[in-house]
Amino acid sequence: MPEPNEPEAEPKHTTLIFIAVTASTTAVAYNSLAVITAIPEMKAEFDMSLTMAQWIMNGYSLTSAVLVAAMGRFSDIFGHIRIIVLGMVCFLLGSLFTLFAADTAIAIGGRVLQGIGAAGILSTSLAILNNAVPEAKRAAAIGLWGAVMALGIGLGAVIGGALTAISWRAVFTVDVLLMLPALVLALRVMMSMPPQTHGVRVSIDYAGLVLLVLSIGPLTFALTHGQETGWTATETLLPLAVGIACGVLLIIVEARAKAPLLRIDFFRRRRYVAGTVGMYVAGMNMSMFVYFYVLFAQSPDGLSYTAIVAGLSLLPFSMAMLFLAFGVPRIPAVANSIWLIPAGMAVMAIGYWFAHRFSSASGIGDTWWPMVLIGTGLGLAYVLLPRTALSVLAEKDAGQGSGVINTCLFFGLTMGIVIGGIVSAVSLRTSLSAVVAQLGLAPAEEDQLVQMLVHGSPGQIEAAFERAAASGSTALKQATQVAIESSFGDVMLLAASISLVGAVLLAWLLRGPPNADQARSANGC
């Protein structure tokens, strides 16, 4: 049945809608990993610090995390077609801003616009296909949509690496080339088949949306900049306190709201909790691995790969995810595959354990099989967790439930880079402080030099090396290579620990039959 707020698509529009939706979601999927391979080149061109480079990813994922659930509610009022068109416009403008960025601020602003666009596209694309495609062809269309999404994510890093070899701006050129024709087609459909609102008044939980922004945003800012500004500094403690306070208030307000943005009652179902927690952990692990691996792979003190080789080296990881994306959906029932979820987390933990041993001497033969293990675990998580979580919700709640799952995923992607960045910075500072202490500098100068080496831009780091050389030291560069290897290894050990805890937690949440959850779903509780 078509959605009540939009008329059924005419047959002549079905193909146009399908092409527009799949092209736009392909751009979003491809963008998620392709941009990571471009960050080292962007960091060098704009002379970014490590903290600012993190915002190239966090500006995108954080915005998507905050808005993806709200966009679903907006589509109930204004129509799915209008919201996906808005998403396409924002994503296209964000791509153009970043493509022609002359400094870091414009590049981050463009990424924020892309995040707004991604939220609009991801929150409506499946609903549009469900409404536009005839029932006899619906399953095939949605399956093809899922395959295209998986292909975009799976090959994003490889394509991004190849394009970055030309220029990092080429990565965003592809975004434009994919999104522009999709927008033209969607506008054509919207003008010839305007969305209609239904007669029922649909409210928007503005209080929940504001509190979600004020909890996730300041918390992320404090954790990202705390290592640089100091954990006891006012500019760290104030946003941290605001984020925690608003997070607590968000739970209270949403539990009492008549039409909440985040349905707290969904979390009474163990399998739904497993889905949201699992997607958060999977998002953390995805960004923690790909982001820090790409930095390590392209670092002169790491694997010393070019951008294209770094992208190609991720192919085993991508192909494992892609294989699972196509293969696992063929398993007919959720009950038959529930054990694969904690098993996948455990496999991921093993992969991260072996990845922590990567060094500047590692070759493709040393790295490909841990990547297969990591990709296998993530592939199982991304395919099975949403399906498991939504299986215990009533059909009328599937859209809102999916929005919360996507929020957890995007927030996990953000926190993976943030927490990984904290561990990396602590590891670098610990390793380098001992070497810098031997230079005979005053304590204040020692601290300033270590700060430059850990948090500085490429230009500042080079100046730090020159300063050390002037003090008669030739050991600092060698110590930096060891420190970078150690910091990457520590981040991978953190990912292994998180995966192992996730495996145990999910095994506990998914224990036993889902009868109680299904009973609640059937009763609409």
Image: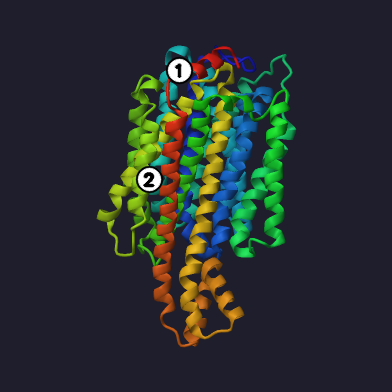
The residue that appears at 34% across and 47% down in the rendered structure is: 351
On the picture, is 159 further left or further right than 200? left
Looking at numbered disc 2 in the image, what kind of residue is underneath it? Ala
On the picture, is 488 further left or further right than 421? left
Q: Secondary structure at mark 2?
A: helix
Q: Quadrant of residue 431?
A: bottom left
Is residue 374 visible from the viewing direction of this image?
Answer: yes
Q: How many discs appear?
A: 2
Q: Quadrant of residue 525?
A: top right
- The coloring applied to the image is rainbow
| Category of crowding for the residue at label 2, using alpha-carbon neighbours closer than 10 angstroms: few (below 14), some (14–19), many (at least 20) | many
In the depicted view, which residue is nearer to us: 41 or 495?
495
Q: Which residue in the protein does label 2 denote?
A: 349
Q: Position of residue 13 (x, y in %)?
A: 52, 20
Q: Position of residue 249 (x, y in %)?
A: 72, 38
The residue that appears at 52% across and 86% down in the rendered structure is: 440
Q: Position of residue 117 (x, y in %)?
A: 59, 39
Marks 2 and 1, how far apart in space?
37 Å
In the depicted view, which residue is nearer to us: 366 or 52?
366
Looking at numbered disc 1 in the image, what kind of residue is underneath it? Arg
Q: Position of residue 498 (x, y in %)?
A: 45, 46
In the depicted view, which residue is nearer to us: 452 or 173?
452
Is residue 318 visible from the viewing direction of this image?
Answer: no
Look at the image and tell me in which quarter the N terminus lies.
top right
| Category of crowding for the residue at label 1, using alpha-carbon neighbours closer than 10 angstroms: few (below 14), some (14–19), many (at least 20) | some
**Does residue 133 lie above or below 88 as drawn?**
above
Q: Which residue in the protein does label 1 denote?
A: 138
Q: Earlier in the sequence, mark 2 or mark 1?
A: 1
**Does residue 36 lie above or below 438 as drawn?**
above
**Does residue 31 lie above or below 50 as drawn?**
above
**Does residue 435 lie above or below 153 as drawn?**
below
